[in-house]
Amino acid sequence: MKLRDYRKNITLIRTAAAILLIAAPTAVYIFSDNTAAAVICLLSMLSVCVLICVQSHTDDKYIIGVVDDLSRLCDNLITLEKKEIFPENEDTMLSKLQNKILKLVRILKHKNESSLAEQENIKALVSDISHQLKTPIANLKMYTDFLKDESISEEQRKEYTEIIGNSVERLNFLSESMIKISRLEGGLINLHKELQSLNETVMISIKDVFSKAKVKNIELSYSGESIDAYHDRRWTAEAIFNLLDNAVKYSDSGTMISITVKRFGMFASVEVKDQNKPVPENERSRIFTRFYRGMNSRSSDGIGIGLYLAREIALKQGGYMNLSARDNGNTFSIILPVEK
């Protein structure tokens, strides 16, 4: 029974009861000479009293039932479960209240899951940082102790000093990368996207990696159509540089790296093609994760942050990363939307 219908019935019963209670004494007085009529009036009054008591008990029972249902509905907020207590197909206040509570449960559950995911991400980041810091810190401690030995030769002293310098550079690079990652993941960096030449952004990255490629005798080849796209020049150049830096780092001397800018539909891509060994198929889904280093890169210096940073920068701008492995090399692409 709906709440408003129940209240209507209660009102009718109470009205009838009031009328009978007023009319019964009058009827007894009128039929005082007629015993049968008087008895009937008294029985009628008694029946009304019983009816009122029954109605009052039913009223209390209904209210207790509603309160119990509301209590069970509130339990949904505590357990974050979506259990229906009242029928959804009824247009009642209780059903409407239930819909609002279930909606609140969904919101709280989503926020709770997001909070747990963020906590796990922070734990993973701290664990990764600790792991990456161990080697350079251990080297600094060990080789600093070696330098305290006055009996070592000048050649050994020079070697130890060079190792310490490399460890310091590694720590510096790692700390800068961690700052970039934490700021990106924490939303502390606001990328300012503007409609500007993507080609000019690519040229900034090529200039930054040119000297490193020249030392390894690696040729850089650039081609592509002129494209204007909405992007943050500084951070996009950082992402493209990471792709180029990776390609140069793992390429053999005398090879070539091709950079191509092209448009397809509502997107523009910057492709970096190398002539390295193709990334194994079982590693392609993990190549853009933080601190991951594939089997082909174990012999080269690096900590596995460049591709991860590039992917984060692309995602922050509504784009994505792509890897295409061929028999004669790999193509890493950063893909960005041309329009807002």
Image: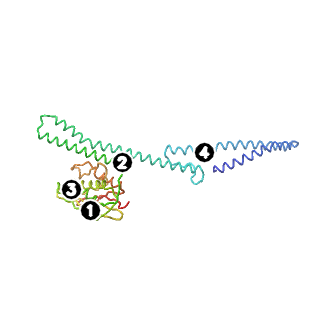
Looking at the picture, which amino acid does disc 1 mark? Thr
Report x, y in % for residue 91: 60, 53
Report x, y in % for residue 260: 26, 62
Report x, y in % for residue 106: 48, 49
Residue bearing the label numbered 3: 210
Question: Residue shown at 60%/45% (left/top)?
Answer: 66
Q: CA distance from mark 3 to mark 1?
A: 16 Å
Q: Please, what secondary structure does the residue beneath circle 3 have?
A: helix
Q: CA distance from mark 2 to mark 4?
A: 49 Å
Looking at the picture, which amino acid does disc 4 mark? Val
Label located before the other in sequence (3 or 1): 3
Label located before the other in sequence (1 or 2): 2
Q: Nearer the viewer, mark 4 or mark 3?
A: 3
Label located before the other in sequence (4 or 1): 4
Looking at the picture, which amino acid does disc 3 mark? Phe
Circle on res. 188: 2
Label located before the other in sequence (2 or 3): 2
Residue bearing the label numbered 1: 260
> Image height check: is 145 above or below 308?
above
Mark 1, Cα crowd under 10 Å, few <14 / some 14-19 / many 20+, is: some
Circle on res. 100: none
Give whichever of 154, 31 is nearer the camera. 154
Label located before the other in sequence (4 or 3): 4
Looking at the picture, which amino acid does disc 2 mark? Leu
Question: Residue shown at 15%/42% (left/top)?
Answer: 159
Q: Please, what secondary structure does the residue beneath circle 1 have?
A: strand
Q: Quadrant of residue 240?
A: bottom left
Q: Please, what secondary structure does the residue beneath circle 4 have?
A: helix
Mark 4, Cα crowd under 10 Å, few <14 / some 14-19 / many 20+, is: some
Q: Nearer the viewer, mark 4 or mark 1?
A: 1
Residue bearing the label numbered 4: 66
